């Protein structure tokens, strides 16, 4: 019989566990992992359990030693254990549980002693258990156990012996020397991918390098892009996302407003990659040289920012791949190559690759080599264009291969698509994901969506990145609206999610002219070179600077999963709290949805969560303005005006009130 008859403990309903352990959960360095399980045995014997975790080995290298942490019994057969990992990489964890005969004996001993029953035999049973443990102990443990065995066998003071047998010292040493040969082990080793903190907390800014020239009408370069980096750093961003920087095809080049006929001077869409100047490993000649690009990467690093590159797996009809590897594309019966379509939309300037190609292995290796090429140039973050239109199994392979070979490479999925597909991309390895934030507009929608992102299994593998706008999307919430609309979307994006981004400088300049009938910008920068005054100041830009500073100074805003919504009596006001793991940084955020009219109402402060008592005064400091107020009740009144800042970020402090101000 291939059965171990000694196994008596069941380990069920383990969380987190994604698709029966098929995919890893995600964390960053030192981020808490809470593991829960139903752990129970037959009968009335006590059980105990530990969490085991270790770094996953690469290849055939020697397996690392398991580390362990004890589980805590929560009641009704529920157990939990918290742990964290301070280095990046793939780690595995599982659970080991056993019948705890010694604790069971201790429990019975106490009950029998309290009932006045004879103790002589009971104490001998305990001594025998400790004697058996001697063989499993270290030298110092053997000596101590032997001493206790003799005391239990020879001490004539029953009360003293019982007290010794129940002591924490004996309990701990017997736990350390327990019999590990009769333990139950969970049937899977689950995986956690631990990444660097920027995977969890980041502020992204997107701009087109070709639109950075200080001279109107001139094509920007990496050098002119380098010149604007200090201003973006001053705004508080830490990730600079660049649309594709590669040569742009001539065939079927798109013109202004996505016109199918381009003028000779039209630069074309950067996403139509490839020309006689090269493909995905080349740079558009007008942007500069490879040395100029590396200089841009290093300049960003000197300002505590990173360059994120667009990884767009598509080609213009002039891309070298089309000639050298025609088997990687779909060809139609008339001899033409199949361009990208999303009926009724047509993208004649863009060719998707064929993942069903018979030559798929060489295709995969070439695509991986593109990522490795730019990693070699100093890039550690990739924004992936439309990953949902490419093979899932390819992404799973690619991201795992990169993670095993390089440390700290992050991938952002630009996928506005069906929920199951977005979830799949998160499971198979994408670090962060675009979301439906852009199309959530009222209190109910936001509360439902954030609850889904933070209170379901999605929290374990799907990291949202909230973008109010992109080059492709000018949402209804901003279309032809005034500056307060931009302030509202900024506050929501930057406080609801720990990762957020924007397409600038259109956002901070409040540009919002829509193409008729579409959620798109008119005269989109995708199809022409623009000229911007990068030093221009707006109220939105000022708030961006303040918000990014507040985000960096308050750890509670550096996570998304810690959000808890609070009641308000006005549906035009949304209120939520965020608290850091140490419960030192306590924030209460309230934002108005109304860009036209003042909105006021009462909000319910979660006093218990903040460690406060009703009718005891506490201080709230608005981190956006520096204003200080004194509250003492659960319900408090706020008023927000579109002419001012349509939101508050209150830091909660327990202190005696200063009666010079009230609200």
Image: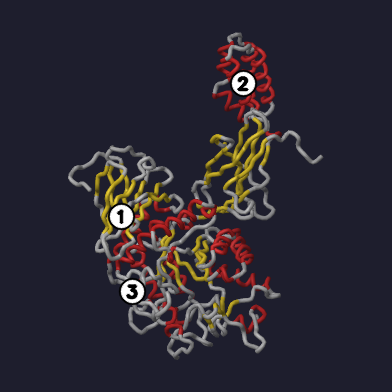
User: Which residue position holds label 3?
Assistant: 480
Query: Which mark identifies residue 648?
Result: 1
Local packing at callout 1 (Cα closer than 10 Å; few below 14, some 14-19, many 20+) is: many
Decide if residue 225 is on the left or right side of residue 50: left
Residue in the picture at 52% in, 61% down: 410
Picture quadrant of residue 333: bottom right
In percent of width and height, residue 625 lies at 26, 55
The answer to whether residue 556 is above or below residue 393 is: above
Decide if residue 622 is on the left or right side of residue 365: left
Residue in the picture at 54% in, 77% down: 342
- Judging from the image, what secondary structure is the residue with disc 1 in? strand
Local packing at callout 2 (Cα closer than 10 Å; few below 14, some 14-19, many 20+) is: some
Q: Nearer the viewer, residue 480 or 554?
A: 480
Kindly tell me whether residue 559 is visible in this rendering.
yes
The answer to whether residue 165 is above or below residue 441 is: above
Local packing at callout 3 (Cα closer than 10 Å; few below 14, some 14-19, many 20+) is: some
User: Which residue position holds label 2?
Assistant: 108
Q: Nearer the viewer, residue 383 or 597?
A: 597
| Cα separation between marks 3 and 2 | 75 Å
In percent of width and height, residue 530 lies at 37, 80
2 and 1 marks in contact (CB < 8 Å): no
Q: Which corner quadrant holds the N terminus?
A: top right
In percent of width and height, residue 601 lies at 29, 53
The numbered mark, 3 or 2, whose residue comes first in the sequence reads 2
The answer to whether residue 651 is above or below residue 515 is: above
């Amino acid at each position: 019989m291939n059965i171990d008859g000694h196994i008596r403990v069941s380990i069920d309903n383990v969380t987190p566990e994604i698709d029966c352990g098929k995919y890893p959960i995600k964390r960053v360095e030192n981020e808490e992992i809470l593991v829960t399980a139903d752990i129970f045995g037959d009968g009335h014997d006590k059980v105990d359990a530990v969490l085991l975790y270790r770094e996953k080995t690469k290849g055939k290298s020697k397996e690392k030693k398991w580390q362990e942490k004890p589980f805590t019994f929560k009641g009704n057969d529920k157990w939990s254990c918290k742990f964290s990992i301070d280095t990046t990489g793939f780690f595995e964890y599982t659970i080991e549980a056993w019948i705890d005969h010694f604790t069971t004996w201790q429990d019975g001993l106490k009950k029998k002693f309290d009932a006045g029953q004879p103790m002589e035999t009971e104490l001998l049973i305990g001594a025998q258990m400790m004697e058996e443990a001697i063989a499993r102990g270290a030298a110092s443990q053997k000596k101590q156990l032997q001493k206790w065995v003799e005391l239990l066998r020879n001490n004539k003071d029953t009360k003293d012996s019982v007290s010794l047998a129940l002591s924490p010292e004996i309990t701990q040493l017997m736990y350390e020397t327990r019999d590990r040969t009769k333990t139950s082990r969970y049937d899977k080793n689950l995986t956690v991918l631990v990444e660097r903190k920027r995977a969890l907390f980041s502020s992204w800014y997107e701009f087109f390098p070709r639109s950075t020239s200080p001279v109107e009408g001139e094509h920007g370069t990496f050098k002119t892009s380098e010149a604007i980096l200090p201003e973006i750093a001053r705004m508080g961003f830490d990730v600079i996302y660049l649309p594709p920087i590669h040569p742009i095809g001539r065939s079927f080049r798109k013109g202004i407003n996505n016109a199918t006929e381009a003028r000779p001077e039209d630069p074309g869409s950067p996403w139509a990659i490839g020309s006689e100047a090269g493909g995905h490993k080349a740079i558009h000649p007008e942007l500069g040289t490879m040395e100029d690009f590396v200089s841009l990467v290093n300049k960003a690093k000197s300002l505590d920012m990173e360059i994120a590159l667009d990884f767009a797996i598509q080609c213009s009809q002039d891309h070298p791949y089309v000639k050298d590897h025609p088997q990687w594309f779909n060809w139609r019966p008339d001899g033409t190559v199949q361009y990208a379509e999303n009926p009724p939309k047509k993208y004649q300037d863009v060719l998707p690759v064929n993942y069903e190609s018979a030559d798929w292995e060489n295709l995969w290796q070439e695509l991986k080599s593109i990522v490795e090429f730019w990693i070699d140039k100093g890039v550690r973050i990739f924004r992936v264009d439309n990953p949902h239109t490419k093979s899932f199994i390819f992404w799973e392979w690619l991201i795992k291969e990169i993670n095993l070979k390089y440390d700290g490479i992050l991938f952002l999925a630009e996928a506005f698509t069906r929920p199951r597909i977005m979830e799949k991309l998160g499971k198979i390895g994408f670090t962060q994901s675009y979301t439906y934030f852009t199309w959530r507009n009222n209190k109910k929608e936001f509360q439902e969506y954030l609850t889904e992102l933070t209170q379901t299994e999605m929290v374990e593998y799907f990291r949202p990145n909230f973008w109010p706008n992109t080059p492709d999307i000018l949402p209804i919430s901003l279309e032809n609206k005034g500056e307060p609309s931009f302030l509202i979307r900024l506050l929501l994006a930057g406080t609801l999610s720990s990762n957020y981004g924007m397409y600038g400088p259109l956002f901070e300049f409040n540009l919002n002219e829509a193409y008729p009938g579409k959620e798109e910008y008119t005269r989109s920068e995708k199809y022409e070179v623009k000229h911007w005054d990068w030093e221009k100041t707006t109220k939105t830009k000022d708030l961006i600077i303040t918000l990014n500073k507040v985000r960096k100074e308050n750890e509670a805003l550096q996570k998304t999963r810690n959000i808890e919504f609070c009641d308000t009596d006005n549906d035009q006001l949304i209120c939520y709290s965020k608290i850091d793991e140490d419960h030192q940084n306590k924030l209460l955020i309230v934002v108005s949805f109304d860009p036209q009219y003042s909105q006021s109402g009462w909000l319910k402060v979660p006093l218990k969560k903040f460690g406060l008592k009703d009718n005891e005064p506490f201080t709230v400091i608005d981190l956006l303005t520096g204003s200080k107020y004194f509250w003492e009740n659960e319900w408090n009144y706020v008023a927000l005006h579109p002419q001012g800042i349509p939101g508050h970020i209150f830091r909660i402090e327990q202190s005696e009130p200063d009666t010079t101000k009230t609200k």
